[in-house]
Image (cartoon, rainbow, N blue to C red):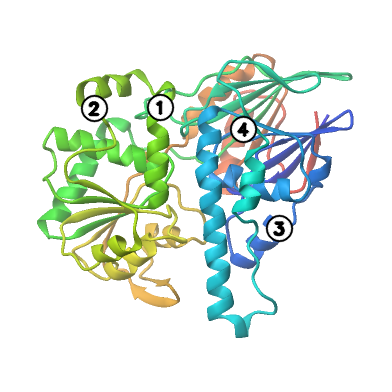
Amino acid sequence: MRIFFAGAARDVTGSQHVLEFDGTRLLLDCGLYQGRRKEASERNRHLPFDPRQVDAMVPSHAHIDHSGNIPTLVKQGFRGTITCTPATRDLCSVMLRDAAHIQEADADFMNRKHADQLEEPVVPLYDEADVLKALKQFRTLAYHQPALVLPGVLCTLLDAGHVLGSAIVQLDIDRAPDRLRLVFSGDLGRRNMAILRDPEIPEPPDVLIMESTYGDRLHAPMAGMEAQLADVINRTVARKGKILVPSFSLERTQEFVYALHRLALRKAIPPIPMYVDSPLSVRITEIFKLHPECFDEEMHAFMRSNGDPFGFENLTYISTLEDSKALNDREGPMIIMAASGMCEAGRILHHLRNGIEDARNTILIIGFQAKNTLGRKIADRAPAVRIFGVEHSLEAEVVVLDAFSAHADRDDLLDFVQGCRLSLRKLFLVHGEEEQMTPLGQRLTAMGIPGVQAPMLGEFARV
């Protein structure tokens, strides 16, 4: 059997891994590559394998860097089944349509405003019709319910604890001459996080493909996270500022709202206006309410005592563009959560443009910021940044709370491997930048883990 590392190899975006055995191909994840416009367009339009020769596909979860290019896969000839959890399918339904809408709007803007600079018109990667066609090929599989995804390939999805419906993919392969168990971690969550259950440990595999996003970093303890958040809010309120929160629509927004709800119940923060300014976040939050089977017991206990964890007094969900624009004309204090999480698009850009030069305000970073993104520049406290092509001085306070991260940190990853090591003979590190991946690989080798590799993009590995 061979593994072709087609994406998220020494990088944290565009996850795609192709398993090849006995003339058959199984694709794990089909994510969008997110980066510089020209490179992203090239990589996303030209998949590094022939979709017509892929026989089945399993996405680990609904984040766009793991599932966002499924419509392209189908558009270019993939006719197989896409197997995932019920929550992942429901989330993909709204997130992929949203991605199509963004691409169409972006193409329209570029063609109208920059036509004289374009060699040829910008064409969306895919449209809503392509998404709807792809959704017909999805089939759902509950956690712990084994099913054949290909002859001789038994798939079991385990809870990854990362986002709603996220899965660790366990494959028991019995196709001569290959008889082995391969586990793909997808993105692993943290233990003791709000809302979701902890990540599970699979039956010991022969081969493990594991993410390494925070491979050499420890998150701040969960215990002090809400106290830190309350401190940030209270000091910003004291100077009558706005707290601007770039937030991923899936999971991070819901976790943040849930934390605000708990703080409000304890009266640890004042009753100021709070806004979730994202139509996609509104739709995703409704999907959360449809999948309580993914929640942990703490969340169920909260719901029994307090009702809806994602709705409370002073919290308003914003959908219309007019209501979003109106927020910029209102004086603080207030909290505004808006996508995108890395500040590369969406309504958060408008709020940053209007608030980044006001020292009363706070920009609160609660998620991973990839290289070359506006979010990374703000997190690194660059003295000035460009928003919509205009340079703005960074005068607002910047606070990074990595305790909100939904990714496993170094010790979580090491513990996960420790639980898998009994029969492990090869471990491939993916979905990580080299400065995180390399030290993690060194630690794993020092632990006595055999066959630790960090494949390059486009590399084939035999197992």
Of residues 282 and 235, which is closer to you in this image? 282
Count of marks, rendered view: 4
- Mark 1 or 4 closer to N-term? 1
For label 1, the residue is 196
Question: Which amino acid, by three-letter code, is at mark 4?
Answer: Met
Q: Which dot, 3 or 4, sits closer to the camera?
A: 3
Looking at this rendering, what residue extends furthest in the bottom direction? 116
User: Please, what secondary structure does the residue beneath circle 2 have?
Assistant: loop
Q: Which residue is drawn at 39% across and 77% down?
A: 391
Amino acid marked by disc 3: Arg
Sequence order check: which comes first, mark 3 or mark 2? Answer: 3
Foreground residue, 391 or 286?
286
- What element does badge 1 sit on? loop
Residue with the mark numbered 2? 307
Label 4 secondary element: strand
- Distance from disc 1 to disc 2, alpha carbons, whole Å, reads 17 Å
Q: Earlier in the sequence, mark 1 or mark 3?
A: 3
Find out whether the residues at labels 2 and 4 contact each other: C-beta distance under 8 Å.
no
Q: Distance of mark 2 from mark 4, alpha carbons?
A: 37 Å
Looking at the image, is mark 1 or mark 3 nearer the viewer? 3
Q: Which amino acid does label 1 sit on?
A: Leu
Give x and y (percent) for residue 363.
30, 57
User: Residue at 37% across / 45% down in the picture?
Assistant: 282
Q: Distance from label 3 to label 2 (Cα)?
A: 45 Å
In-front residue for pair 91/427 = 91
State if disc 2 and disc 1 touch (CB < 8 Å). no
**Helix, strand or loop at mark 3:** helix
Identify the residue under disc 3. Answer: 45
Q: Which amino acid, by three-letter code, is at mark 2? A: Gly
Q: Mark 4 points at which residue?
A: 210
Of the two numbered discs 3 and 2 in the rendering, the one whose residue sits closer to the viewer: 2
